[in-house]
Image (spheres, helix red, strand yellow):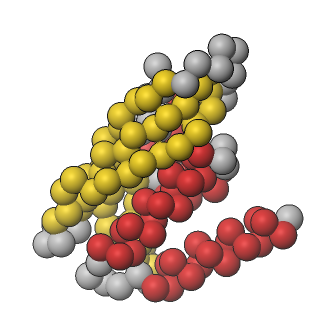
Amino acid sequence: MRYAAFLILVLTAIAACSTPAGDRETLEQSIKLYNSMLQWQETNNASLFVAAKQLNDFIAAADAAKNKRIVEARPRITMFDEMKKEAEVRVEFDYYHKTDNKLRTAVDVQKWVFVTEGKEAHWKLASPYPVLP
């Protein structure tokens, strides 16, 4: 419960710090927090970063991947367009299947967009849950 309250506080702080310009620093914070949540299997919290039209698919894919455990996520911004308020991030995931414990690596390309919802503006993930074969 304390962790959930702390997480909500962190998310609120990130949202409050976001600028209408959708700066790179805010993007990097969102990317780091989202991928950390995936690593710690906090998919409910990670879903807060997912764009509304991707949410149902995200939840279904996360549920299907419950037998896989992400050990490390290494994100790297490959494209950042400040004018379009879009970014592309290449993330290498080290993970294993809980049934065989063999460490594997998968690469995911995440598309992020800066959206304004009412008075709030923040970065949202516009791509599906990572494929971990």
- Is residue 32 at all visible to an observer of this figure? yes
Location of residue 98 with respect to 9 vertically, above or below: above
Location of residue 25 with respect to 76 vertically, above or below: below
- Is residue 62 at all visible to an observer of this figure? no
Residue at 45% across, 65% down: 30
Seen from this angle, which residue lies furthest top?
100
Residue 46 percent location from the top left of the image? 57, 53
In this view of the protein, which residue sits in the foreground, 27 or 95?
A: 95
Residue at 31% across, 41% down: 109
Residue 26 percent location from the top left of the image? 39, 75
Residue 87 found in image quarter: bottom left
Residue 76 percent location from the top left of the image? 32, 54
Q: Is residue 90 left or right of residue 17?
A: left
In this view of the protein, which residue sits in the foreground, 91 or 85?
A: 91
How many numbered badges does the structure rendering display? 0
Question: If the image is split into quadrants, where does the N terminus sit?
Answer: bottom right
Residue at 38% across, 51% down: 75
Residue 36 found in image quarter: bottom right
